[in-house]
Image (cartoon, helix red, strand yellow):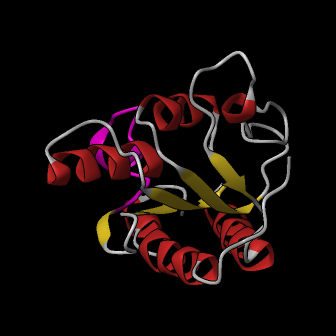
Amino acid sequence: MTFVPHASDEALVRRALEVAAVAPHTGDVPIGAVVVDADGRELAVACNAREATADPTAHAEVLALRAAAAKRGEWRLEGCTLAVTVEPCTMCAGAIGLARVTRVVFGAWEPRTGAVGSLWDVLRDRRLNHRPEVVGGVLADECAALMESFFTTHR
């Protein structure tokens, strides 16, 4: 099932790109995430911090979900949208589903590890009780260019 992007999706991914730009300064892969509530108010932003924190779970999505839940004072993020620069992995897709996020918007597809339509489609698995709306490929070229630039200079 394919969903049509909202007018604000591009702005959300642009915000995630701004946040992602912080990650390379710590040696982390430049992935950024933003969580907004149903009214479009920003609840949290985060970039990858695995290298900076020596935490294998410190992906941008997980960190943003944690911060948004803390700000709301509850773990259920119903009504919220998570925007991220790169298609979430299986760990992040699981966290998104468990947090009950309503929408996921992402930029670049990730054919090697993507779990929201590329390699796997965790979030739209009909066996799960919560399946958020997923919109992929928003500003895909810009998001992919950021990743390509990082990997040509860091690895």
Quarter of the view holding residue 111: top right
As displayed, is residue 66 above or below residue 121?
below
Foreground pick, 34 / 17: 34
Residue 50 colored in magenta in the image: yes
Residue 74 screen position, x and y as percent: 20, 39
Q: Quick check: 50 left or right of 9?
A: left
Could you say which is closer to the camera, residue 62 or residue 154? 62
65 over 6 or under it: above or below? above
Q: Which of the 4 image quadrants contains residue 116? A: top right
Residue at 54% in and 56% down: 29
What percent of the width, then of the height, locates residue 136?
75, 60
Front position in the image: 129 or 144: 129
Quadrant in the rendering for residue 13:
bottom right
Locate residue 101, reporting x and y percent.
47, 45
| Residue extent of the magenta highlight | 45-59
Q: In the depicted view, which residue is nearer to us: 151 or 19?
A: 19
Disc tally is 0
Q: Position of residue 7 (x, y in %)?
A: 64, 84
Q: Quadrant of the C terminus?
A: bottom right
| Residue at image coords 47%, 80% | 18
Residue 132 makes an appearance in the image: yes
Is residue 39 on the magenta stretch? Answer: no
Residue 125 vertical placement versus 123 (above, below): above
Q: Is residue 87 visible?
A: no
The residue lying at 63 percent from left, 19 percent from top is: 128
Compared to residue 32, the image places residue 68 above or below, namely above
